[in-house]
Amino acid sequence: MTITTCIFDAYGTLFDVAAAARVVAEEPGREKLAAVWPQIAADWRAKQLEYSWLRAVAGTYVPFWEVTKDGLDWAMERAGLQDDLELRERLLALYWELPAYKEVPFMLAHLKAAGKNCAILSNGNKDMLEGAVDSAGVGTYLDALISVDKVETFKPAREVYDLVGARFGYAPEEVLFVSSNGWDAAHAAAYGFNTVWVNRMGLPMDRLPGKPGRVLSDLSTIPELV
């Protein structure tokens, strides 16, 4: 069946989540952060995801922005920087301006030229996604920004993936779902989507019921698949 719709995860897939810590670490007077920014970036992302899963299981949903702040607070405390409130605010501000990976505009432009629907399906709340999309300048290529806020739970809950069909009206087999999270691509595959795992870090395959249909190192060849 022909692929009609290309759905992308946002954070880590289209947008570089490590950029906030990396950029701030390069600013004058940020020597303490410069020494630990890779750890903070990794811990921030790990806790952001862990807290979303735990909240989904426990039924204690809050918007992803609250999860993002909680994850940063944990990461900063682990690095001994929890008292630097100005640094915290600076890092959080830049999370609304994450850059897209360099291949993203070209890739999306080619998909739209081929007549494909393109959208984001993300844990991020709508205003977070709008900020990242506007900052990266890729809004013209996207038909929808779909947030889990509509169902008040997080990926990989099935009701999150249901949002794609509700928005576009296509069967799962007509959808190409792309994520940099192996667990997300695996669950999307089990749901019935065609899937691509963008494995930028060369990680092992997750041991989960579903398996991504393709594994790529970046997004540049996505248009060739559809």
Image (cartoon, rainbow, N blue to C red):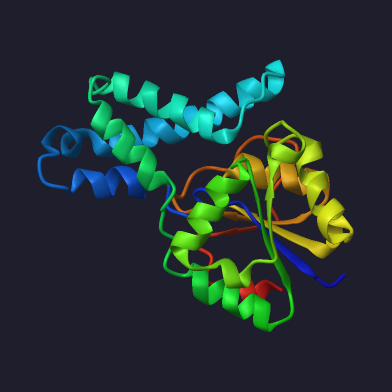
Q: Is residue 199 visible?
A: no
Closer-to-camera residue (193/138): 138
**In the rendered view of the protein, which quadrant contains the C terminus?**
bottom right
List the single residue furthest toward the bottom.
113
In the rendered structure, the answer to whether residue 186 lies left or right of residue 10 reads right
Closer-to-camera residue (163/204): 163
Q: Position of residue 111 (x, y in %)?
A: 65, 76
In the rendered structure, the answer to whether residue 104 lies left or right of residue 152 reads left
Q: Determine the residue positioned at 78% across, 61% down.
A: 175
**In the rendered view of the protein, which quadrant contains the N terminus?**
bottom right
Q: Would you identify the image quadrant in which residue 4 lies?
A: bottom right
Q: Position of residue 9 (x, y in %)?
A: 61, 51
Q: Position of residue 131 (x, y in %)?
A: 50, 53
Q: Is residue 183 visible?
A: yes
Q: Determine the residue positioned at 85% across, 54% down.
A: 165
Q: Determine the residue positioned at 52% across, 59% down.
A: 133
In the rendered structure, the answer to whether residue 64 lies left or right of residue 165 reads left
Q: Is residue 118 above or below residue 209?
A: below
Q: Is residue 9 above or below residue 220?
A: above
Closer-to-camera residue (175/89): 89
Q: Would you identify the image quadrant in which residue 136 lies?
A: bottom left
Q: Determine the residue positioned at 62% across, 47% down.
A: 126
